[in-house]
Amino acid sequence: MTTGNIQLLSETLAKAKAENRAALIAYLPAGFPTVDGGIEAIKAVFDGGADVVEVGLPHSDPVLDGPVIQTADDIALRGGVKIADVMRTVREAHEATGKPVLVMTYWNPIDRYGIERFTEELAAAGGAGCILPDLPVQESAVWRENADKHGLATVFVVAPSSKDARLATITSAGSGFVYAASLMGVTGTRESVGEQAADLVRRTRATSELPVCVGLGVSNAAQAKEVAVFADGVIVGSAFVQRILDADGDEAAGLAAVRELAGELAAGVRRVS
């Protein structure tokens, strides 16, 4: 049986902690701007300094995503992206870099594809796990059983509205790390990440030994530095997608832009003692 790379993910996050910094986790959708272009973008982000990459599985109804990622998903879907392309993206990005690659997806595509088939293929592709923002923990047993069997992390999302008892339920079921949404609302850049995120990380840590990584709203080095003070990882998505959109079809310019942004963010997550 092929097993996934949850251990590599854990080791990567532990290494960042040992270096007294937060890990930089980037998000890019598969198939954007094309399947090949998306793979090259992930390689560029790793080259710029990202520790982990989340590959988005484009969905026709991305209710938790803001307009930037919705635009990228639409481009990918119109380009005909399939789950096989997502698996290929994970495989080629991981094989080229040796770094942990996860999939971030809504539950419906997995449910339709088949849980066992999805986890088996993700593990075979070298994936480290899955982030499942809309899968209720109480309905996740079959997924977690299959993920555990194939050595994949199950990353759940917690929000500022989550009560302490709910946090404990979520974190006890998850593995790899906990995705802490810095604020209520959809993905996208924000002027400020705010104090809500620091409080959520503190409350989440009280329930679990898992690393706590913060996403939603982080788009530049200053914000990355702010979050890195209290979080184990800083997750950035829309800002990378926007750089590719701004390149307006110029692939070389898009790759250079995401590589540059990764470098700036990687410098931001290195805490000043």
Image (tube, rainbow, N blue to C red):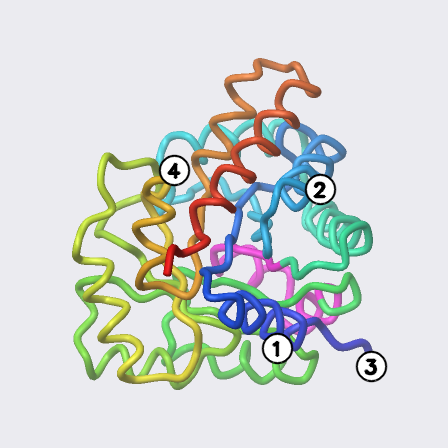
Mark pair 4, 1: CA separation: 31 Å
The mark that comes first in sequence, 4 or 3, is 3
Residue 43, numbered circle? 2
In this rendering, would 206 be left or right of 40? left
Q: Say few, some or many: other residues with alpha carbon within 10 Å of mark 2 (under 14 / 14 to 19 / 20 or more).
A: many
Q: Residue at x 66, y 14 (%)?
A: 250
Q: Earlier in the sequence, mark 2 or mark 1?
A: 2
Between 63 and 98, the residue placed more toward the observer is: 98
Quarter of the image with the C terminus in it: bottom left
Of pointers 4 and 2, the one earlier in the residue sequence = 2
In the displayed structure, would residue 270 be above or below residue 5? above
Query: Main structural element of the magenta stretch: helix, strand or loop?
Result: helix
**Residue 128 percent coordinates (x, y):** 65, 67
The tag on residue 212 is none
Q: Are marks 3 and 2 in contact (CB under 8 Å)?
A: no
* Disc number lying in front (3 or 2): 2
Of the residues shown, which amino acid type is indicated by label 4? Ser
Q: Which residue is mark 4?
A: 219
Q: Earlier in the sequence, mark 3 or mark 1?
A: 3
Q: Is residue 251 magenta?
A: no
SS assignment at label 1: helix
Q: What's the residue at 30%, 44% (across, down)?
A: 186
**Front: mark 4 or 1:** 4
Label 4 environment density (alpha carbons within 10 Å; few <14, some 14–19, many ≥20)? many
Instruction: Please name the residue that numbered disc 3 is placed on.
Output: 1
Q: What span is colored magenta in the figure?
A: 102-122
Residue type indicated by callout 1: Ala
